[in-house]
Image (cartoon, helix red, strand yellow):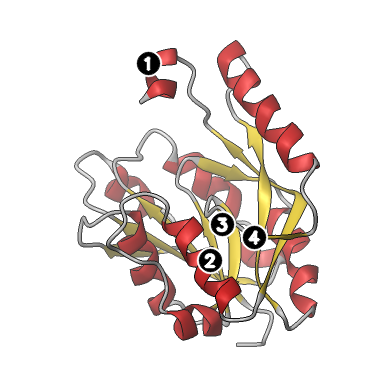
Amino acid sequence: MTMDSVSLVIPGRDCAATIRECLDAVVPMLERTPLREVIFVDDGSTDETAEIVTEFPVTYIKGEGRGPGSARNIGWRRARCPLVWFVDSDCVAEPEALTLLLPHLSDPKVAAVSGSYGNMASHSLLACLIHEEIVQRHLAMPERVNFLATFNVIYRKAVLEEVGGFDERFLKGQDAELSWRVLEAGFDLGFEVHSRVKHFHPISWRAYLR
């Protein structure tokens, strides 16, 4: 593998409603970008997730049902490439989402780079309002930040190895806690607003408030 080759890790659980569109977007990147493998870690699905994923040329791993932090750790440790891109199973990457992240890693001090959101539910007023708030916040962010979310982020595998990956004791906030440890280790974190994955934002108040 070359130094810019990328493994994609997608953690998921009961994501049959979204995983086909997620994979339809990223599998073509295997032919035209530095993406070399796609790894899906199933964190205990009980729906048709496994059947859908195995239709695609991806590595399917049955996880341990211990949450997204555990699933991401399983995935990046199995990755064969020096760069590991994480995308959530309810996100659909735009065609240039990956390649727009990579230039930031030309700086050896940058350990990881994240991108922004698009909106997969543009028919919903609630989803559009949620999305607009995110967009305005992201447009105001600098290129060097102190926190990276995991819905669209690329890490150097060597840095994940150095700091120990995601802390599986936390069911939420593993991305923030990992960001803090990476900064404490002396690295920088980058942000690229033009790298977007479209997200299935909630379309009901009940779903949004959960």
The earlier-in-sequence mark between 4 and 3 is 3
Instruction: Quadrant for residue 154, please give it.
Output: bottom right
Tell me if label 2 and label 3 are in contact, CB under 8 Å. no
Residue 206 — which label? 1
Residue ID at (37%, 16%): 206
The one nearer the camera, 4 or 140, is 140
Mark 2 vs mark 3: in front = 2
The earlier-in-sequence mark between 3 and 1 is 3
Tell me if label 4 and label 2 are in contact, CB under 8 Å. yes
Mark 4 vs mark 1: in front = 4
Q: Is residue 130 among the parts visible in the rendering?
A: yes
> Disc 1 marks which amino acid?
Arg
Disc 4 packing (10 Å; few <14; some 14–19; many ≥20)? few
Residue 27 — which label? 3
How far apart marks 1 and 2 lie (CA) works out to: 32 Å
**Position in image of residue 148 (x %, y %):** 59, 57
How far apart marks 4 and 1 lie (CA) works out to: 31 Å
**Position in image of residue 150 (x %, y %):** 52, 55
